[in-house]
Amino acid sequence: MNRITTLLTTIILMGLFACSSKPDAKEANATTNPTTKKLKALIIDGQNNHGVFPLTTMLMSDYLKDSGLFTVDYARTAYTWQGPHYDQDALGVKAADAPILLEKYPLPTGQKTTVVEKPQPDPDFNPNFSDYDVVVSNNGWQAAAWPDATKTNFENYMKNGGGLVVIHAANNSFGDWDAYNKMIGLGGWGGRSAETGPYVYYNDAGERVDDPSEGPCGSHGPQQDYVMTTRSPEHPIMKGLPTKWLHVYDELYDRLRGPAENMTVLATAYSDVEKNGPPWDKKVVGTGRHEPLLMAIDFGKGRVFHSGMGHMGTAMECVGFMATFQRGAEWAATGKVTQAVPADFPTETKTSTRKWANRK
Ligand code: ZN
């Protein structure tokens, strides 16, 4: 009996010790009320011109879990296409070795895919979206269209109050899918034109301009550090963030256009005429406009958080990317943000990064 009592006491004490140990600041929200059920997130990927996606999916998965708010599942297409963009310097792999990233950063499910050289539709891709509080798209330019039934399911999920987070080149995908363009507010490339919707930007007087002129959709200059400017400081995602903060070495998307219905611009960055001309076309220059890079969109009863940042894993290691992603995901899932702004959030003159703990 004594031994059992001692054992029980030890177990109880261990439990108490575990409970009374100082919770990680990032876990604070979840540990405040242990009965709170975690939110369910689904990350979708598989076809992205940013061949780095196996890494960035796992990085974003960790960010969601680190917030203490989410559990994470994954829906990857059976055919995976990894385009030419990945951080060769940081990853030490050559273009032809892109599939190695699938091995280096495998999904926890152990799912194996068929690597293809061109995007290819997956006729069986049909996640049960309604099981989730938020869906995060880590797709990219030229991702193959989903089956019609999947598109319909996703539209219904969103209309009925679903959540969506769109990261960087996910706003290049599906340019001919009208409902998707409405969900993301603005997009780049993907065949988008004046018919898709106006350019949206802020002028130097701080006014939003919706400009229906003809013209190409989507460009960016070489990667650079750039200042983000908050435009909606009272929005739950932005509340408490600095008015200006310096984002680390990333592409700065400009010339985005789209329906922009029910869209709140949360933050912009200035596309410098000289600094933000695309390297692939010397005739094109930066826009000289303040370009929307963080947006919140209502779609039916659903909510969308759109972040144009995140070209590479290194850009996602910016504490500003991380915190806005975590806050945006919570807002898309619940309409509220309970997370504190990290103490090491970047300032107007100083970038701030945290190396992703599981980078290999
Ligand atoms: Zn990019």
Image (spheres, grey):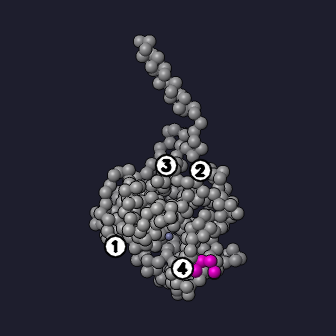
Q: Are marks 1 and 2 in contact (CB under 8 Å)?
A: no
According to the image, label 3 marks what residue? 65
Which stretch did the figure color magenta? 274-279
Tag nearer the camera, 1 or 2? 1
Tag nearer the camera, 3 or 4? 4
Chief secondary structure of the magenta span?
loop
Badge 4 or badge 1: first in the primary sequence: 1
Badge 3 or badge 1: first in the primary sequence: 3
Query: Which residue is painted at 38% across and 65% down in the image?
Result: 97
According to the image, label 1 marks what residue? 118
Q: Position of residue 172 (x, y in %)?
A: 46, 73
Amino acid identity at mark 2: Gln
Whether 234 is among the magenta residues is no
Tag nearer the camera, 4 or 1? 4
Task: Give neighbour class at mark 2: few <14, some 14-19, many 20+ (Cα, 10 Å).
Answer: many
How much space separates mark 4 and mark 1, taking CA atoms? 24 Å
